[in-house]
Amino acid sequence: MKKLFAIALALVLCLGMCSAMADIKIVQNKVEIDAALQSYAQAYSATTGTNVSVVTGGGSSDYNTVLRAEFASGAEPDIFVIEGPTGYELYKEMIADQTGAEWTNYTTAAYMDGDKVVGFPVAIEGYGLAYNKDILDKAGVDPAGLTNINAYREAFEKIDSMKEELGLDAVVSMAGSVSGGMTWVTGLHNFNVYLTVGLDRNDTSIIDQVLQGQVDSERFHSYCQYVDLIFKYSDKDILLTGTQDMQLTAFTSGKTAFYHQGNWMDPNIVALGCDFEMAYAPHAFLETDTDGILVNPPSWYVINSNNGNVEEALAFLNAMATTAEGHNYMLVDAAMIPAFTNVEGTPSTPLSKSVMEWNLAGKTYSWQQYKLPDGFGMGTLGTIYELLASEAIDVDTFEIMMIDAIATIPTL
């Protein structure tokens, strides 16, 4: 009996040691949290013995290209990111079921496949048109009034006429070039303005129409006019060739009044020591008032069931959602808005604070851009936005080309 017990104990210890020595790899898409996630992964590895490595794509490099390369390398990730239905469908057969995981008790933002939990929400994120309050105050522009396109026309024109006095290079900092890897800003996030602004969060009528290859003519015309307005008043060098870093620097150095990015940029803003007051105004492209910003989980961590490390991967995600170290990583180090109810505290960083305020006020619109076919937003639409930005086409041609491109969706 003693011999059998000794053998059993040895097996238990061996299994424990084997588990502790497991390696898991994460491939994720948020360059702005790379340093924080790397640091958290190292601390987790030191504590648990599970070696965690992080590979990052996104920003000015295409995350999906990075992810495909990792799969092609033969060393598949154990945890990777999906951004919505298109990504889920691509990898559905290998994605592990996380139903019943401890972290699921503390969120309503999990990615679901029917009744099955398949995705861990990375954060809650939002975006509108960020503004430098000091500059708007000096220009006599009240951001609370920026709730329709006519208000934006008046504000942009006024600020543009005062550029020298205000020390500005341009009114808006926006990047959207193919070469800069920034077509996700135009073909995904800006296009989502058309898809959801002014609609109830559960209203999918516009994205449903787009997926059928059609647009709402009046609404789409207004949207195209809004895109043209932003491009007209954007810093042309940044718009046509700029990277994410260049776009951020122009805003944080006080060279533009507005910034077309989301609260995911907060870690970079803090790192640059930016101390002026900033917040979000709506992407209000209609003539009627729309008073809200775009808020959603941006992406979800999923677990690869093919690698044999599901248990270790799930333990990592559970720790992130349920431990003080994980909470500190999400809220403080990564400056994110956690999607979990058991995380105490509120964001101290400026854009996340603004997103939280809009969210608490119930003034938010959904994200529907990731329902587009794989590569369509960044690849197909992104190149058309760039043509307008470069003035190779006018806004009327832009509208026609966009409608023609959307018409091809049912055949993709």
Image (spheres, grey):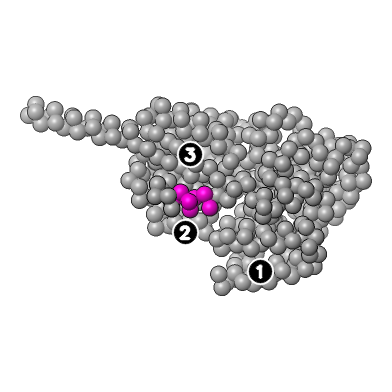
Q: Going from the N terminus, do you reach mark 3 or mark 2 first?
A: 3
Residue topped by disc 1: 405
Please, what is the three-letter code of the amino acid marked with disc 1?
A: Ala
Which picture quadrant has residue 398? bottom right
Q: Is residue 296 above or below residue 199?
A: above
Q: Going from the N terminus, do you reach mark 3 or mark 1 first?
A: 3
Q: Position of residue 375 (x, y in %)?
A: 58, 60
| Residue in the picture at 46% in, 42% down | 26
Residue range corresponding to the magenta coloring: 65-71
Residue topped by disc 2: 90
User: What numbered label is drawn on residue 62?
Assistant: none
Does residue 288 show up? no
| Residue in the picture at 52% in, 39% down | 340
Q: Going from the N terminus, do you reach mark 2 or mark 1 first?
A: 2
Residue topped by disc 3: 54
Residue 129 shown left or right of residue 29 in the figure = right
Q: In 3D space, how far apart are the residues under numbered discs 3 and 1 (Cα atoms)?
A: 36 Å
Q: Are marks 3 and 2 in contact (CB under 8 Å)?
A: no
Q: Position of residue 342 (x, y in %)?
A: 50, 34
Q: In 3D space, how far apart are the residues under numbered discs 2 and 1 (Cα atoms)?
A: 22 Å
Q: Is residue 325 magenta?
A: no
Other residues around mark 3 within 10 Å, as few (<14) / some (14–19) / many (≥20): some
